[in-house]
């Protein structure tokens, strides 16, 4: 280890010690564990699911969105809505309501973007039984898990920013809407391009008129299953390889090397794709990817099985610690 590396390690250690606070504990490699409660993140996932499917345009979606905003504000974030419309796979207008929460430093430069989608898919189009395919999903993993982790990250950062002597980085938590309304499998009409991730496409389309500058971003999607595995997704490696390496190295140092597997996964069109290609911000997708399944996703993906029975506080804990460590070690 060179002197420079020792210095960098000390620097990261100091910031992490600040993030660790009173729950300070040390990982298997001696790295300080950030204070993050997987149980708290789990309760935020369960709360979202309790609203019912969060399909854009429905009352459940609106009630959940209002709860997300009031929760983030209570945690100390300054929150803004970003409202508009996009066209769906059939060419019909769909309302978009992105939620943007600012925490930490107010500087417009070198901010960190943390994102997940809070809408849920209107159909269970991966169900084997055809009749079941028109039922909306609970989205406990697909949507709510990433948002649950980010709410707990926000709660922790909100506590830390009360200490005005601490220099926190600027963090924007963006909860994207309308990620999961892409063309359903049963649709037989004309195929339209770019039907997924409408909220992040809308967000990215407004980037030129927005003042914030981001150094990098992390998207969390399907991060709660007890048997989750997060290989290195191909678009993330193509556009943000340095940050992929940093996140997976941090995970290994915290003892989560088997969860954050050092294997390359196929490209996935998720919100990070548009953050990279439209907004030009290097952005990494942490996503449960199962190379052994036909679609590359877990068996419950886009089915009625995507419920709380497949969410584990232990997995949420690991993901949250890694995110906080990366934020602290910037
Ligand atoms: Zn989905």
Image (spheres, rainbow, N blue to C red):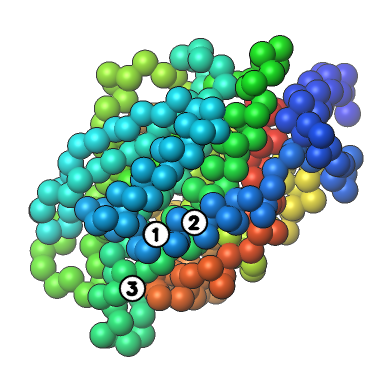
Q: Where 125 sits versus 330, above or below?
A: below
Nearer to us of marks 1 and 3 is 1
Q: Residue at x 24, y 56 (%)?
A: 58
For residue 151, what is the image quadrant?
A: top right
For residue 264, what is the image quadrant?
A: bottom right
Q: Is residue 181 left or right of residue 328?
A: left
Q: Which x, y percent locates residue 114?
A: 51, 37
- Say which mark, if any, is on residue 47: 2
Nearest the eye: 321 or 186: 321
Q: Is residue 210 left or right of residue 218?
A: left
Q: Residues within 10 Å of mark 3 (few under 14, many from 20)?
A: many
In the rendered image, which quarter contains the N terminus? top right
Residue ID for mark 1: 51
In the rendered image, which quarter contains the C terminus? top right
Specify whether tag 1 is near ligand 1 (CB below 8 Å). no
Q: Secondary structure at mark 1?
A: loop
Residue ID for mark 3: 124
Residue 207: tell me if it is visible.
yes
Q: Which x, y percent locates residue 189?
A: 11, 68
Q: CA distance from mark 1 to mark 3?
A: 18 Å
Q: Where 120 sits versus 276, above or below?
A: below
Disc 1 + disc 3, Cβ < 8 Å:
no
Residue 276: tell me if it is visible.
no
Disc 1 + disc 2, Cβ < 8 Å:
yes
Q: Residue at x 78, y 31 (%)?
A: 21
Mark 2 and mark 3 lie on one chain; the one further toward the N terminus is 2
């Amino acid at each position: 280890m060179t002197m420079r590396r020792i210095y960098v390690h000390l620097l990261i250690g100091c910031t992490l010690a600040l993030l660790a606070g009173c729950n300070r504990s040390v990982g298997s490699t001696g790295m300080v564990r950030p204070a993050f409660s997987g149980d708290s993140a789990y309760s935020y996932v369960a709360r979202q699911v309790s609203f019912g499917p969060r399909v854009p345009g429905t009352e459940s979606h609106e009630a959940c969105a209002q709860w997300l905003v009031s929760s983030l504000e209570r945690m100390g974030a300054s929150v803004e809505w970003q409202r508009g419309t996009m066209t769906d796979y059939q060419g019909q207008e769909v309302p978009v309501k992105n939620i943007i929460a600012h925490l930490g430093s107010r500087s417009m430069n070198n901010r960190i973007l943390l994102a997940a989608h809070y809408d849920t898919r209107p159909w269970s189009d991966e169900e084997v039984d055809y009749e079941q395919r028109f039922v909306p999903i609970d989205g406990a993993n697909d949507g709510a898990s990433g948002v649950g982790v980010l709410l707990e990250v926000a709660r922790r950062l909100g506590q830390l920013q009360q200490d005005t002597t601490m220099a926190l980085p600027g963090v924007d938590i963006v909860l994207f809407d309308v990620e999961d309304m892409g063309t359903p499998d049963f649709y037989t009409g004309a195929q339209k391009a770019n039907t997924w991730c409408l909220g992040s496409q809308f967000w990215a389309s407004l980037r030129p008129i927005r003042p914030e500058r981001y150094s990098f971003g992390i998207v969390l999607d399907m991060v709660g299953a007890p048997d989750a595995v997060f290989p290195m997704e191909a678009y993330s490696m193509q556009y943000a390889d340095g940050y992929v390496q940093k996140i997976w190295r941090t995970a290994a140092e915290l003892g989560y090397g088997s969860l954050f597997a050092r294997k390359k996964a196929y490209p996935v069109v998720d919100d990070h794709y548009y953050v990279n290609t439209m907004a030009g911000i290097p952005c990494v997708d942490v996503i449960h990817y199962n190379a052994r399944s036909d679609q590359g996703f877990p068996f419950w993906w886009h089915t009625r099985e995507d419920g709380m029975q497949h969410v584990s506080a232990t997995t949420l804990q690991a993901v949250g610690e890694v995110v906080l460590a990366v934020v602290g070690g910037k």
